[in-house]
Image (spheres, helix red, strand yellow):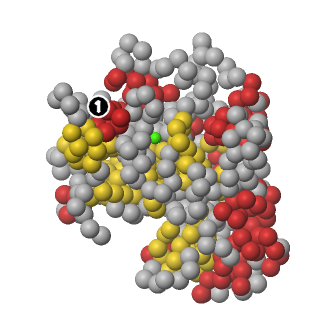
Amino acid sequence: MINETHDPALKSWVESANSPDTEFPIQNLPLGVFRRRGTNDMPAIGVAIGNQILDLRSTGSLGLLEESGAPLADATAASTLNGLMALGHAEMSRLRRLLVTILRADGRRAEPRSLVAMDQAEMLLPAAIGDYTDFYASVFHATHVGELFRPQNPLLPNYKYVPIAYHGRCSSIVPSGTPIRRPSGQIKGQESTPSFRLSERLDYELEIGFFIGEGNKLVEPLTVDQSEDRIFGLCLVNDWSARDIQVWESQPLGPFLAKNFATTISPWVVTYEALAPFRCPASKRPPGDPAPLSYLSSPGNETQGGFDVVAEVWLRSGAMRQTGAAPVRLSRGSLRDMYWTLAQMLAHHTSNGCNLRAGDLLASGTISGSSRGSEGCLLEMTRGGAEPIVLPTGETRAFLADDDEVTLRAFCERTGHARIGFGDCTGIVRPSTFDD
Ligand code: CA
């Protein structure tokens, strides 16, 4: 799993990739889709390296990817990652090795026109996402939210057996940087009947998403171990949520319009192989919890099924931006603390024969830990709005205000390995009348 492409001593001829604070050293090489800013160029697949993007279509046309063979060469020339995703881990591993030979300090340098500065690029959605499923895999989040609504019985009895999820919506998934308009909906407060009005309880949810690589056929479930091989790579997901709409609409069938007005994802997909040095055991269940049913367990999953990805939420209000104040960190949690691993979620999703396809997006659910400061949404952090947080400007927030900028970040860090980051997942809340 860990090979010479993870060597922490590797350097790139792209100088910014060797900076100690870069999120994109040569050991990372996440994939995304971009076009040159201000043009109508056909979108191209790129690789993040330092503060630059290596354009794979132009790299291929220069012959630098010629050893990759036809399917890989065709897939790298496309305008979405779906073709690459469908090729599977072995082919992605070949691409990673080729990219290292092109980008390493003593390697085959690409021509200048193959490199685009990140600040000259517009990042697009990385894949044509066919289906999107949102899980609920943090037992801490599920318990804390449950306590707000059912203090005597916060965690429902199915939670420790079933990786809970709902089917989300793809059409409103947007790349980082897209403005988020405050939604309106049916809301019922203390009054006896609901009315249709602007949401006053707009929230974010800090999540990690994972894209499906090779899919499975209809009626062919995947084991947990097979599911490992179908994880293409990870990104950040902000599952924007209108809590006042949610609380009124979501019984008995679950979230609907409270969630599907927008979902922001980070544009770079950190590949499965780049994450190899940061694997960890599945989180340990407390004594007395049931063991996962056999279709959700394997020895490999138990010892190496986790991903040690630290994820954070940063907030900057409109007033903070005006005064040049830096964003403030609201929370920090880790994907390693989730009750279910990504492979368990994937295996569960296919366990009834449901087919997943290359480019489908599955998300972890809100990443929260057990302690204060690790709550991955405001609903949980402010105890349903009862304990507002205070910003450096003295402003308070129970939920998001217009012009608030929410940025999700994630990184992996381990002694003896290069630190890698995910890049920002940002959205600014705008009034419903906002016109971009
Ligand atoms: Ca969610």
Image point 71% across, 34% down: which residue?
A: 351
| Residue type of the residue flagged with mark 1 | Gly
Q: Is residue 375 above or below residue 289?
A: below
Q: Is residue 72 visible?
A: yes
Q: Is residue 418 visible?
A: no
Residue 358's x, y, as percent? 68, 56
Q: Is residue 164 above or below residue 86?
A: above
Nearer to me, 343 or 198? 198
Image point 71% across, 85% down: which residue?
A: 61
Residue 376: quarter of image: top left
Q: Secondary structure at mark 1?
A: loop
Horizontal side of residue 175 vs 204, given as left or right: right
Quarter of the rendering occupied by the C terminus? bottom left
Residue 115's x, y, as percent? 58, 81
Image point 65% across, 83% down: which residue?
A: 58
- Residue at mark 1: 384
Neighbourhood count class around disc 1 (C-alpha, 10 Å): few under 14, some 14–19, many 20 upward: some
Nearer to me, 90 or 195? 195
Residue 147's x, y, as percent? 37, 21
Image point 45% across, 32% down: which residue?
A: 253
Q: Is residue 405 above or below residue 192?
A: below
